Image: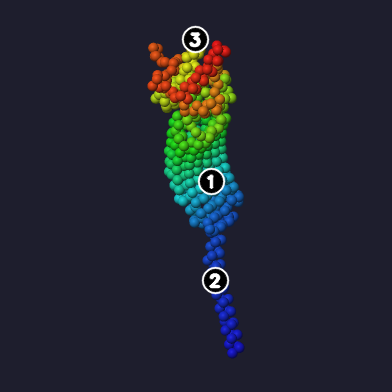
Amino acid sequence: MVTRRCTERRSSARNFKGGLSLWLILWLVVVKPGGVSACPRLCVCYPTPMTVSCQSQNLTIVPAGVPYDSQRVFLQNNRITELRADSFGFETQVLWLYGNNITWVEAGAFSNLRVLEELDLGDNPLQRLEGGAFSGLEKLQSLHMHRCKLAALPHDLFHKLYSLQFLYLQENQLHFLQDDLFSDLVNLTHLFLHGNRIRALSENVFRGLVNLDRLLIHNNRVRQVNRRAFRDLGRLTILYLFNNSLAELPGQAMKDTQGIQFLRLNDNPWSCGCEALPLWEWFRKARISSSELMCTSPSQRRGQDLRFLREMDFALCPLPDPGSLAGTTTTTFSTKTRWWFSKHKPASSSKASYQKRTDTGKAFSAGKPQYLPKTPSETFSSKYELSEDEVALPKLDQEEYWSNYGNEDASIPCFELECPPGYNNPVFPSSSNLPSTPSVLRLLSLSIIAFSIHFLFG
């Protein structure tokens, strides 16, 4: 009996060991070798989600053997020099290639990555970027090409990237942006262009960006913004244009940004003569968080904030063309402005200088600024200098500016110095257009101030 039990125990032990050995063999043959062979040499692989990390291995080409179902592939900080059409034979969602030495991206290089959502090519010297480089990436959401020494972009580079939401092009060497470059990026929300050398924003440069939320163009060399450059940016909430070379910004361009909330325009050489009138008027109606806009010209207004200039600072400016997109509507001035000038008419010499300013103003009011010829020494001089009559105007501080916001009487169709001959324009509006009681009180107050100034200095 005892011998039989011992024999059964030995048999059970042998069966257990045999079963264990069988499972071990199956694991070694099926599982282990498969895992090892699926991970490329010099790379580390992680499951759930399947990740292949080959960073900082001095690789010169994209390694072979990357599992087809890899969701994330990290190839950053290597020495890869080019990406050809057959470089990628796997399907992934995240691909990092930043910090390599990639100079050439062939058309169709990523065409096999049909479900790719994030592509990072930052910090590569992309000297040759072909137009169809990103063809097939219709699910791409984020594209990084910062610090890639890009001087120009192919016109069809972003063709059919309908899902793209984030585009990083900052700190390159871009001098200009072609019309319709971003026209297919209908879902783009963030566009980073800061730190380039862009000089102008044309009429169609941002066409198609109907969902753009943030536009960063600071630290460039922008001198000119077309009055219709922002016409598709109705959902824009953040605009950075600081530290550029802007002397003017069309008021119509800002009116197209209906949803703007945060605006930075500081560190630009703002000219605060008649050419600033449309932008000043836009600021009077806008309720946004804005940086300061310090005037650099004319000399009498240097150091003042353009947003808080007085209405009377623009009293001698010609009326914008009603059909011009630069002015959008005919500008009129309040009764109190007209009353002051009716009592303080400029001398004949002042009228002559005013006529010269009218010519300059009309060039701007046509919607296309036309600058009078200047000598090199006058390149940064003001196009509009204050006369003695303007300098003598009573000052208006910021608090008074905001307290009077929206209470101006716009019933005067033209300003006295600009009315046609024979035009009978009363000093005060007719009884049907009389201002409200608060307006009358302000008129009386200003009358007293103006009379005192005339009594003391006239």
Residue annotated with mark 3: 348
Q: CA distance from mark 1 to mark 2?
A: 43 Å
**In this orientation, does residue 217 appear?**
no
**Residues packed near mark 2 inside 10 Å, few (<14), some (14 to 19) or many (20 plus):** few
Task: Give the residue at mark 2.
Answer: 23
Q: Which mark is residue 120?
A: 1
Residue type pointed to by label 1: Asp
- Disc 3 or disc 2, which is closer to the eye? 3
Of the residues tagged 3 and 1, which is closer to the observer? 3
**Kind of residue at badge 3:** Ser
159 in relation to 71, above or below: above
Q: Position of residue 136 (x, y in %)?
A: 44, 47
For this orientation, the residue located farthest to the bottom is 1
* Residue at point 54%, 38% (across, down): 170
Q: Nearer the viewer, residue 293 or 179?
A: 293
Answer with the quarter of the image where residue 135 lies.
top left
> For the point 44% across and 16% down, which residue is it?
427
Amino acid marked by disc 2: Trp
Compare marks 3 and 2 and give the one earlier in the sequence. 2
The C terminus lies in quadrant: top right
The residue at 50%/24% (across/down) is 276
User: 10 Å neighbourhood of mark 3: few (<14), some, or many (≥20)?
Assistant: few
